[in-house]
Structures are given as C-alpha cells and as structure tokens.
Image (cartoon, rainbow, N blue to C red):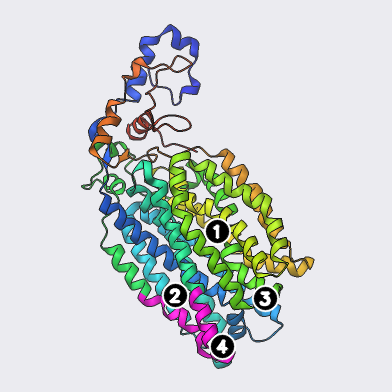
Amino acid sequence: MAAPDNDESVDPAAVRRHRVLFRAIEKRRHPKLRRSDITVTDDAAVKRATKAAALGNAMEWYDFGIYSYLASTIGRVFFPSGSDTAQLLGSFATFAVAFLVRPLGGMVFGPLGDKVGRKRILSLTMIMMAVGTFAIGLVPSHAVIGLWAPALLIFFRLVQGFSTGGEYGGASTFIAEYAPDKRRGFFGSFLELGTLAGYVCASGLVVVLQTLLSDDQMLSWGWRVPFLVAAPLGLIGLYLRLKLDETPAFQKLEGGQAKASEAADAVETSAAADLGKIFTRYWRPLLLCLALVAAYNITDYMLLSYMPTYLSDELGYGTNHGLLILLVVMVVQMCVINQVGRLSDRFGRKPLLMTGMLGFLFLSLPSFLLIRQGSVVLITLGLLLMGLSLVAMLGTMSAALPAIFPTQVRYGSLSVAYNLATSLFGGTTPLVITALISAFDSTLMPAYYATGAAVIGVIAVLCMRETANQPLAGSPPSVETEAEAEELVQAQSPPAEVLSSRGMPRPPSRAGHSTVGSGQAGNAVRATTPEARPVRR
C-alpha cells in the first residue's frame, strides 16, 4: 500500500482498525532523525556570510537612497523644462523605471542562483550594481547632451534594477541557509541592518554636501559625488563575497562536500528551478510572499525613500532638516533592529510581523497629522511612530520570507515574488503618492496609502504559518553545537509510540523548540526524508 500524500486524507476509523499497518506506513514515511542528518554550524562562517550579505544589501540601498534623496536635484539636471512638480514626477518616474526590470532580474538570477550557486550570482549582482551607480555619476546633464542625458540615466537605472532583482532573494537565502534554526531571525535582521546603514550613509552624505556646497555647485557637480562613491564600496563588497563558501544546504543539493549531512541527499536534486515549476507548483507560497512584500515595501519606501521629498516639496520644510530628522529615526531603528530579530526567534515571526502591520494600520493617519504641524518635535514623533512599526517588519521579514519556499527553489521563487511585489508596489510608491497628492490636493494621501497596504499585510500574516525555530523546508536541521544535535536526536521517540488525536502516529515535538504546527524534531524528519514533499505555505 502506498503511503497517503497527507494525513488529512486518512480515515480515522481505518487507522483504529489497522493500527499496526498505519504505524508501519508512518515509520517508513518519517524515519527517525539520525545524528548525521543534522548540520552543526560554524559560528565564524555564519558571521562572515552575514557580514558579506549585509554589506551587499547596504550597497543596494545606498544606491537607491541617494537617488531618492537627490530626486529634486536630479529632476532639475535631467528634466529642466516644466514645473517643479513635472520635474519631480520625471525624476520619480526614472526612479520607478528601474523597478520595471527587477522582476526580469529575479527571473534570470533567481533560478541561476538555484542552479549554479548563491555565491556566484551574488558576486555578479554586486558588480552590476556598482557599475550602474558609478556610471550615473558620469552621465552629462541635459544642458550638455540634450535628450541623451535622461536616456542614459534611464539605461543605467535599468542596469541597477536588473542587478537588484537577484540581490535580496539571494542575500536573504544566503543568511537563512547558513544560520542555525534557533537564531535565524537574529542573523537575518543584519540584512535589514544593512538596508538602514545604506540609507543612513546616503542621507548623511547628501546632508553634508548640501551643507557645504551652494545650489549651483550641487547642480553642477555635487550631486555626482555620492554616485561615484559606489565604486569603492562595490569593490569591498565583492571582495567579501568572493571569500565565502557556498551555503551547506546548496552544496548538498549540488552533491558536493558540505558540512550539511547526508539528510540533504533526500532533497530533490534538480536545481534548475525553472520558472514554469515555480509558477505552477509553488503558486500558493508565491501569492503569500507577494502580499507580504507588497505591504512591507509600500511602507518601507514611503518612509525611507519618499519622506524627505514629502517634507520639502509638499510641506515646504528645509531639505536638510527633513533629512536630519529621518537620519535620527533610522539610527534609532538600527539600534533596535537586532533585538527585534531576537524577539522573532523567541516569540515567532507572526507576532512581530503583525505588530508592524497593525502599527501602520492604526498609526499612519495620526503620524501624518503630527508631521503636518511642522514642528521639529512633532515631525520626529510622527516619523518615530511609523519607524518603530516598520522596524518590527524589517527585523523579521528577512528570516520569514526564505522559510516560505523549499531549498531547491528558494532563491528563484523568493526572487520572483519579492521583485514582482517590489516593482508593482514598492518602487512606484513615491510616484503614486506624488500623483495622488496632486490629484486630490491632500497631503494626507500617503497616510491613506499606507493604511491600505497595512490591511493587505494583516491578512497575509494571518494566512502564513509560523516557521521560527524550525528547519528550512527541504534542508536538514541546523544547530549551533554538537550537544544540541545529540539532544535533538535523543528527544525523539519511535513514531509508533506517538499517536495524533486522529490515531495517526507522528514524531514528537521537542521541548523548547516547538512552534505552531509541530516541533523541530518532527519537522526535521519531514524536511529530510525522500518521501517528504516540499512544505507549502
């Protein structure tokens, strides 16, 4: 008799009548976890991988941050004709165009990352991003070469967008596959620490330049400096990434030597991860990931990219003052984001994500009402309310998203879903909000937009499964010490001795490591046996 595909299809009455038979079936489907099935992580290697991935992410958001913070200046350099609003719309349209090709980059680089390796693709995306950003700093102005100026700007923005399509999915996958199961949230939070660091460096450099240089100097050459700085930053990031080894999970998928154990041999070994399989077999987790990323990115781009422009162009606030206030908010976020990661390991991903979504749902409108008052204290308070809501998502999302997909398609599926959502909702946020304010003549439109995004986010969080402290789907369990590995093995009882409420035997949960659904030991077995199917969330 073939084992049923899932326990829900089993008739409880049949189980009670044929207990011995069903125990044998369950034992075959979920054999006991062996010591060789467990990865013991190398702490130094995990930290190196985290550092390299976070630096690359910082580079990515530094590039996008400087474009956002210099949007008004870039509009005057490359789109000189028309009103101030037309210039700003032209600049943000060019900002958004990079997001049009991000899904293409994800569809190319993501499956390649599942096929040839995470490290190689992450190194390639780093090179392309640095080249694209550096080249923007060299493009002549509209006054020098006419329409070729915005054309070249758009081309190099497309290069940036295409390379970014393979960045976040790969970087979050890289950290998730290196980190031990119990600390994936903590190490994953460093990826978004890199995001904030990139924004902080970008805003800090823009403030310094606008303080030291006159308006004419900024228009003539000052705006180029932040873009040219990208070249040395990119070389440093590339050096760190090239020194890394592949993740243990991918090496075992590929059949190479790895610290991961024999358990990974049971994982489906085809790493092609073609787009057809991603869209047909994994469409449910794709939709979940799309909804989560859409809600998260609308609020992210609104606060970290658009707010300086909103303060200066819509409220008439000084550009440097707005940037300095946002800089303070981002520094506060950097101080707490790793603690948010720790909390997600302790209490779960869902509670932290829900906290952030509900924060934007109920606090967006009050925050913008405070910001509209114009005083430094009230603007700072309004931005802090949204900033603390955002950091609850920032510190959790990079650990939650990779866990949605199994190892053999993780890079590709996450890259496709993340970049589709980012292109449709994240990158267009400044453009959409500017257009909405112009159409409805209300400076509260950003608050309404963020509230709508939060509603989608709340629904998505309710639909997701808890994954904290569990092995990644399709990968062996990962622990920090040999003692933990032995304890995990010893915590198991023979499958025949444990019966579910329906009478079906199940591997037991391990005390101290159980989460919603089942424990780490049980999930470890399911993730590493030949009969186990990829977890669908």
| Alpha carbon distance from label 1 to label 2 | 19 Å
Q: Which mark is residue 317?
A: 3
Mark 2 lies on residue: 132
Q: Can residue 93 be seen?
A: no
Q: Can residue 317 be seen?
A: yes
Dot 2 or dot 3, earlier in sequence? 2
Which residues are the magenta region?
Answer: 204-232
Q: Which mark is residue 219?
A: 4
Q: Residues within 10 Å of mark 2 (few under 14, many from 20)?
A: many
| Alpha carbon distance from label 4 to label 2 | 20 Å
Examine the image and state in which quarter residue 329 appears.
Answer: bottom right
- The amino acid type of the residue labelled 2 equals Gly
Instruction: Return the x and y of residue 322 as percentages of the image width and height.
Output: 61, 72
Q: Which mark is residue 422?
A: 1
Examine the image and state in which quarter residue 19 appears.
Answer: top left
- Residue 97, compared with residue 350, is above or below; it is below
Q: Which numbered mark, 2 or 3, is in the foreground of this view?
A: 3
Q: Are marks 4 and 2 in contact (CB under 8 Å)?
A: no
- The amino acid type of the residue labelled 3 equals Tyr
- Residue 220, compared with residue 54, is above or below; it is below
Give the residue at x 62% y 50%. Answer: 359
Looking at the image, which residue sits at the far left?
A: 257
Dot 4 or dot 3, earlier in sequence? 4
263 part of magenta stretch: no
- Residue 488, compared with residue 92, is above or below; it is above
Residue closer to the observer: 188 or 529: 188
Q: Main secondary structure of the magenta part?
A: helix
Local secondary structure at mark 2:
helix
